[in-house]
Amino acid sequence: MADARLSKRKIPVLPDVLANTGGVIVSYGEWIQNRVGNYWDEDTVNGRLAERLDHEARLVMDRAEEEKVSYRTAAYLHGVERIAEAIRKWGNMHDNK
């Protein structure tokens, strides 16, 4: 209901999947650091996070504009496509064995 009202008033809403993803990205970075034993300083972590968030947000915002959909819908479309691509790659990887 809130989404519909905000949309009707042309108020953009940043989808939760983008707004909350920073913690997930940083956790993944910590996991990578622990696996390879290479630890980044705070500036490096923040820089990598900003770069990734900026890139993904731009993809979602551009898609929303191109397809005339909300940011939330564009984020879902983008996410589903990334999952589908990962599944395709996973299948191809196992087909070649």
Image (tube, grey):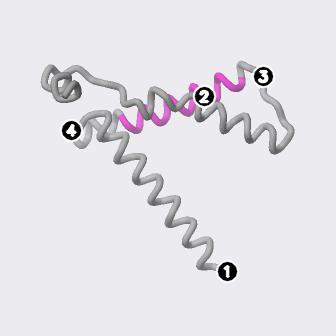
Pointer 4 residue: 68
**Residue depicted at 55% across the width and 65% down the height:** 89
Few, some or many residues within 10 Å of mark 2 (<14, 14–19, 20+): some
In terms of depth relative to the viewer, which is nearer, 1 or 21?
1
- Residue 77, how many percent across, how many down? 34, 47
Kindly identify the amino acid type of the residue bearing the numbered disc 3. Asp
- Label 3: how many residues lie within 10 Å, few (<14), some (14-19) or many (20+)? few
Q: Label 4 amino acid? A: Lys
Q: Based on the displayed image, in which of its 4 quarters is residue 90 positioned?
A: bottom right
Magenta segment includes 65: no
Where residue 54 sits: x, y (%)? Answer: 49, 29
Look at the numbered disc 4 and give the secondary structure of its residue: loop
Determine the main secondary structure of the stretch shown in magenta: helix
Horizontal placement of 45 versus 54: left or right? right
Mark 3 → mark 2, Cα distance in angstroms: 12 Å
- Reading the image, the residue beneath label 1 is 97
- Please name the amino acid that badge 1 sits on: Lys
Q: How many angstroms separate mark 4 from mark 2 (CA)?
A: 28 Å
Contact (CB < 8 A) between labels 3 and 2?
A: no
Task: Decide which of tag 3 and tag 1 comes sooner along the chain.
Answer: 3
Q: CA distance from mark 3 to mark 1?
A: 40 Å
N-terminal-most mark, 3 or 2? 3
* Marks 3/4: CA–CA distance: 40 Å
Under circle 3, the secondary element is loop
The residue pinned by badge 3 equals 41
Viewer-closest of 68 and 73: 73
Q: Residue at 56% x, 72% y: name it.
A: 92
Residues marked 2 and 1 touching at CB (< 8 Å): no
Q: Which residues are magenta?
A: 44-60
Q: CA distance from mark 1 to mark 4?
A: 42 Å
Tell me the residue that label 2 is attached to: 49
